[in-house]
Each structure stands twice: as structure tokens, then as C-alpha cells.
Amino acid sequence: MQETLPTCRCRAARNCGRLLNDQLEFVMEAHNGLSARLVREAGFKGIWASGLAISAQYGVRDNNEASWTQIVDTLEFMADASDLPILLDGDTGYGDFNNPRRLVRKLEQRGIAGVCIEDKQFPKTNSFIGGERQPLADIDEFRGKIKAGKDSQHDEHFSIVARVEALIAGWGMDEALKRAEAYRLAGADAILIHSKLSKPDEILTFAREWAGRGPLVIVPTKYYSTPTDVFRKAGISLVIWANHLIRAAASSVQAVAKEIHDSQTLVAVEDRIARVDEIFRLQDADEYSAAEEIYLSTSRWSNAAVVLAASRGAGLEAITADRPKVMLPIAGKPLLRWLVDAFKKQGINDTAVVGGYRADAIDTAGIKVVVNQRHAETGELASLACAVDGLQGDTVISYGDLLFRNYILRDLVASEAAFSVVVDASQTQPVNASVSDFAWCSGADDRDLFGRKVVLRRVSNDSAHEDHAPQGRWIGLLNVRGAGRERLQKMVATLRMRPDFDALGLPALLNALIDAGEEIEVQYVYGHWRGVNDLEDFRRAGDFAHAQAPFAIRTVAG
């Protein structure tokens, strides 16, 4: 049972309609996906997949040095990039009668509208390179190729164009007309008559003698100055602009490459070439972004992170005179870089850092910096407010002085909850002034392998109003997912109205969300993280970071 792909039928039908139309139509050469898209945007109704151009973009000669399977692979990209009908310059059919049979089937599978084959011998040479010395195929042999191709097509609308080279080879008008008629009778859907003269005399004579026996196609590469109305009056069906995009590309690339080489700068060429954004547009980057919203919306990865890093660090003044706490070196790299690298390992590549004290000293590589201009008199919540309106998707909010093992962040962003936090069950009592943010939860960490749902009840440093000890300590990581983002933004806006807003920290935000009825899911850990709050923490942080380094780069003291 023979089956035809719908996309194939659509393209082939449209192309055939043009070939059989009494109105003059035009197709433009393309040689890859990008040029095919540009042809469509220019307004053309069809594409000529030029053998010369495709071989040139591969950097090989137009002598069948690129295999027909490589040509077909290129056509697949072109068909994907443009919904226009594509007519392939199929050279001689790439062999005897058997090769066109398989070629036609493969072209139909890829939605190509038709193929043009020429009556020369395989392997071919471009017609403008010693064309008069090139031998022509036997008429009966070439008729067999046409018939074999037509008998092999599954789609009745697929077109086979027979290209007559008799004028190029110097065999004369009578031979050209004899061959064209033989090919028409063999089933060719149209005849392409080719000439290398700079005037259209041969073409017009052929068209007059042909007398409309079938659609006629021309390639006016040499007689390009001929007014188009001349072709229209002669009854030509299709004009192929055969190689102009590859030639335009070559001359432009030559000029730009030479300019950059000689000047050793991009200044002179940048305004003359396409913007990078234009290349992204032609690659359909916006479609990918839209699809990402649909198909990755339930992904376990967060889209972004916000790091609160406005502090100099109380108790760290001796080592933060010229930099904020987040830029302190921990085991050979800044604390901030440990955080950013941890985010990237979990697919979080969009990180915003809210700076304040010595924000100018923050390494901005790969991140965005937002500055809390009032950092000296405000707290963590005011810093978050500087960035919260810009949140677009799932987001991790983090203190800027954290180090943690990778699994902690991995499991946090895997949560499906609108809000989730990490609580360390090993810290239930303050041991020094730097230990704060104790968490009261709906249940304790029972170390159950499969766990159970636990939600946050309160984050506080005051246990006087609680009837039991806290279940742990919030470490400073909050994941916001899905609709939780808008609810977080609204809550921050509400808290802005409080007279004590400038003094509020993130625990106040968590507590306000809980009071508003939000469930904040708790992920328990037992150690495996460090905060840098004083000089002793700074010393211990180096030991912790060294322990996280890959085995391949660890060193062992002798």
C-alpha cells in the first residue's frame, strides 16, 4: 500500500500548480535552511535547490562531489525552515534509471515538490564550464530516467522537470526541440531549456517553436539583462534565479573577513552586518521560548535564583574593607561563585544578585546585579523587594553567605509545592549569637527514608511564645514555584506598607505567607551546609568547601 505524507502533498501540489500556470512565476535559489527562510521572507513563492549553490556551501565542486544523500539531507533542513515548495536541481539523476527511482521516493518523504534532471552523462560538470565539450545522454536512456521517476512517485502532484542541454553543448535548435518533445512524451511535467548566451535569442526561438506544448522553464543567469516582460510575452511558465544568494553570501563574507583581518577590529563591520538578534529571529528562537513555557512548565528545575548579598558582614569588618561578604574567598574562589556554580549544576542559569555594600566589587560574570541603594538602613526583605518585581518563573531565593552540598538544592527545586524551604534538623538550640532563624514545623524530622509532608509553622528567634522546642533551623533557602511567584510578589507589596518594613528580614516574609494561609513545605536536612556569619564561620567554610571539591582536584597533605 502506497502512502503519502500530507506535507509532501501540500508542497508538491502548490509547486505543480505554478508550473502548469499560464502566469509567469519565479523561484529563488537557496542552499541551506537559513537561505530557504530568507527566500520565504523575501516573498518568493518557491525555492530552487541549486546544485551549484549546495555544492559550493559544502566547499566542493559542482561535479557530483557531494553525494545525493548529502543533498537530500540538506533539503530536509530547507523544508523544515520554509513552507515553500522546493524544486531540486537533481543534476543527471545521480546515475542510471534506478537512481531517480529511489531519489523521487526520498524527496517525497521529505516534502520536496519536484526534481529537475538534465540530459548529460553522470558525473556531470556545471554547464558553464566547457559546456560545448560535455557529452549528452542518449535520448532513449534519458527518457527511461524520466519514466522511471514518474512511475516511482507516490504523489501524483510531484513534478519532474526535464532539462535540455542541447543548446549549451552546441547541438543546435533542432536537436533541442527533438529532445524536449521526447521528454514530454516520456512524462516530464515541464521542460527547462538552457542557454549560455548573453542574449535570450536561443530561448525565445525555442519558445516560439515549442508553441506551448507544455510548461517551459528558463534560467536567465547569462542573459540577465533581458526585461522580464520579454519572458512573459514568450509564454515562459517559470523563471529560476539560480545562484544569486550563494554568490551574494560569498562576496559579503569575502569582504567582511578581509576587513576584520586587515583592521584587527570589528568596529568597521559591525554596523554593516546582521545583528545577532536577527540571527536568533531567523532561527525561530522566540518559538523555542514559547514552547519552553508550555513543555518545561512542569519541569523540576527552577528558572532563576536571587541572591541577597547587600551586607558587609557584621563581625567580618576586618576582611571586608574592600569587598562585600559575598566576595570573600572560600577555598580559592569567592563565596558568590560557589553559589552560582551550585545553581548551574541544577539547571539554574539566570542568577540575580542584590548588592549593596561595595556592590562595585561584585564579579558580574554570568549574573545580573541589582543594587539596594539603602542597604545601610534596610534589611533582607528590602533587598528582595529590589528584585522581586522582575521574577518571571520558578525562583530560588538564597542568602548570600551559604555553602551547601549539591543534593540540598537538587531536592529543594524538585518540590512541587508553591513554597518550600530547607530546615536543618540538627540545629534546634542556639550555640552562639550567629545561630538564628529557628523553625517550628508541623512535625519533626523522623529520619524516615520516604519522609512525609511537613509544613512550616513559624520562623523565629523567640521561643518564649512557643509551647515546644523548634524542629530545626531554616538555613536561608526558599524555593518559589508556579503560581507562588505572583503570591510572593503580592505579599512583598503588602509588607511594604508596614512602617517597620525597612527592618524586616526574610523570616517576616515566611511568617506573613503562613498567616495568609500559604503552605510552605519543609525539606529536612541534617547538617551538610555552612553559613558565613563571623570569622570562625569563615575559617570553617574553607574546610567545608574543600570537602566538596571533586576527587580529581583534591590534594592530600603528606
Image (tube, rainbow, N blue to C red):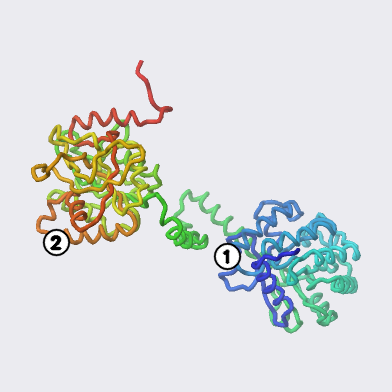
- Give the residue number, with chain letter if any, for mark 1: 37
Count numbered badges in the picture.
2
Residue at the (38%, 48%) spot, across then down: 349
Relative to 7, say whether 207 is above or below.
Answer: below
Q: Residues within 10 Å of mark 2 (few under 14, many from 20)?
A: few
Q: Quadrant of residue 104?
A: bottom right
Helix, strand or loop status at disc 2 = loop
The residue at the far bottom in this view is 233
**Image quadrant containing the C terminus:** top left
Compared to residue 475, the image places residue 26 above or below, namely below
Q: Position of residue 336 (x, y in %)?
A: 29, 41
Q: Amino acid at mark 2?
A: Met
Q: Is residue 238 left or right of residue 304?
A: right
Question: SS at mark 1?
Answer: helix
Front residue of 200 and 43: 43
State the residue in front, 487 or 17.
487
Seen in the picture, residue 127 relative to 502 is either above or below; the reply is below
Residue 139's spot in the image, x, y percent? 90, 65
Which of the two marks, 2 or 1, is nearer to us in this view? 2
Q: CA distance from mark 2 to mark 1?
A: 53 Å
Residue on which disc 2 sits: 497
Name which residue lies at 40% across and 30% down: 550
